[in-house]
Image: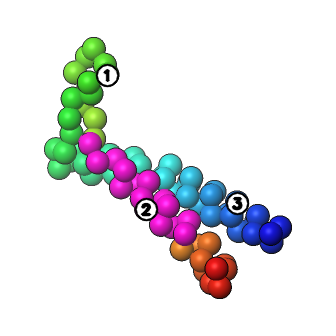
Amino acid sequence: MEQLIIPAIIAIVVAFFSVYGLTPFVIRALEKRNITVVDANKKEKTMIARPGGLSIIVGIELSLIIFLCIFPYL
């Protein structure tokens, strides 16, 4: 069980930094293609990118790939 802690931490760190680094690029690409909506939670009419979960999915997939490359038998 202890041998799984380090790869799990590595996978978590990779997921965090991939989402953190990829999100600005996804937002710019969505704004460039005009895939935005008005933010309903703010008084001013701020436009936000709608499908921002793409970077989260990529982060999860990268962490799974790295974890499974380290431990292919799981």
- Dividing the picture into quadrants, the one containing residue 68 is bottom right
The secondary structure that dominates the magenta segment is: helix
Q: Does the stretch in magenta take in 59?
A: yes
Q: Residue, x 27% and y 14% (percent of image)? A: 43
Answer whether residue 47 is visible to the viewer in this image.
Answer: yes
Q: Earlier in the sequence, mark 3 or mark 2?
A: 3
**Where does label 2 land, which residue?**
58
Is 53 displayed left or right of 21 in the figure? left
N-terminal of the two: label 1 or label 2? 1
Image height of 27 relative to 45, above or below? below
Residue 30 location, x and y as percent?
25, 48
Asked which secondary structure carries label 3, the reply is helix
Whether residues under marks 1 and 2 lie with C-beta atoms below 8 angstroms apart, the answer is: no
Of pointers 1 and 3, the one earlier in the residue sequence: 3
Amino acid carrying mark 3 in the image: Ile
How far is the residue under mark 1 from the one under mark 2?
A: 27 Å
Can residue 32 be found in the magenta stretch? no
The span picked out in magenta is 50-64
Q: Which mark is residue 41?
A: 1
Is residue 1 rendered to the left or right of residue 63?
Answer: right
Quick one: SS at disc 1?
A: loop
Q: Tell whether 46 sits left or right of 61.
A: left
